[in-house]
Amino acid sequence: MFRIIVEADYALYTRPECKVERATYPVPTPSALEGMLKAIFWKPAIRYVIDKIVVFHPIRYAGVRRNEVKDKILPSAVRRQMRGDDADPCVYTKESISQRASLLLRDVRYGVEFHFEMTGIRSDRPDETPQKYVEIIRRRLAKGQFFQVPFLGCREFPIRSLYAVEQFDFGEVDPSLMGERDLGIMLYGLRFHDDARLRENWDASYFSDAADAVFYHPRMRNGVIDVAKYREAGS
């Protein structure tokens, strides 16, 4: 079990129903926090699981307008160019730029309690054990190491600080968050259509970009979201 504190100037946990003009959930989604942890350390052999979220700062919003690129590079164009065919796999921002409004969270501070599970995907290394990954994660958290800048929801909103703690100080939760708040139906994460039968053979395993959205119905009590409790209730 790990516990960390993360702070950032801004965060954006996009609601799926607000795809064009982005609007954030009031609190982090488990999948967004899993992505943040993967920026610190990740291997195919492990899967992060969020157990508890503590919201310390009051929930404040900010509205901004951003220039976004609305097109994506087509894999088919890349493949044609690699074959030597006449193809242009580039996206030109001046032609595909689009200005959109976003509703963000500002000045956020969260406590995140999490653990990891072994996925069953194994490498050729003989030391593929849970204890090995526990030590790696603890070391990287202690040293502030990451292989890409962790962010909260969108890459434009990197974290300001992240550090491990032994226990959360619930006395630091803002008084405005006291009591119980129904957060409604929220996105929990995505379930990808991978072929779990071939997990023992990395080279033969099938990994798909297709995925199903998984939702859950959490409540926040005195700033604390017991993700494990509501995850089990929705499963």
Image (spheres, grey):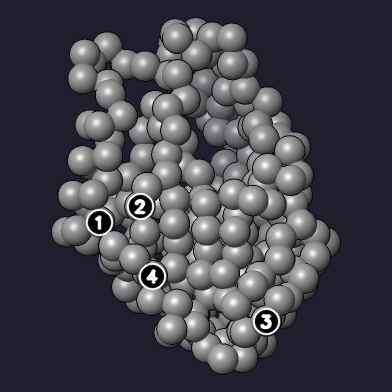
Quick check: 4 left or right of 200? left
Quadrant in which the C terminus is drawn: top right
Query: How many angstroms separate mark 3 from mark 4 (CA)?
Result: 18 Å
Please state the horizontal and vertical placement of residue 37, each as a whole percent of the image. 41, 52
Q: Report helix, strand or loop for mark 2.
A: strand
Say what amino acid the circle numbered 1 marks: Leu
Q: Name the residue under label 2.
A: 2
| Residue neighbourhood size for the residue with mark 2, other residues' Cα within 10 Å, grouped as few (<14), some (14–19), many (≥20) | some
Above/below status of 94 relative to 65:
above
The residue located at (32%, 16%) in the rendering is 123
Say what amino acid the circle numbered 3 marks: Gly
Ranked by sequence position, the earlier of labels 3 and 1 is: 1
Ranked by sequence position, the earlier of labels 3 and 4 is: 4
Quick check: 5 left or right of 212? left
Q: Name the residue under label 4.
A: 168
Ranked by sequence position, the earlier of labels 2 and 3 is: 2
Query: How many angstroms separate mark 2 from mark 3 (CA)?
Result: 26 Å
Q: Do the CB atoms of the residues marked 1 and 2 lie less than 8 Å apart?
A: yes
Query: How many angstroms separate mark 3 from mark 1 (CA)?
Result: 32 Å
Residue 233 in view: yes
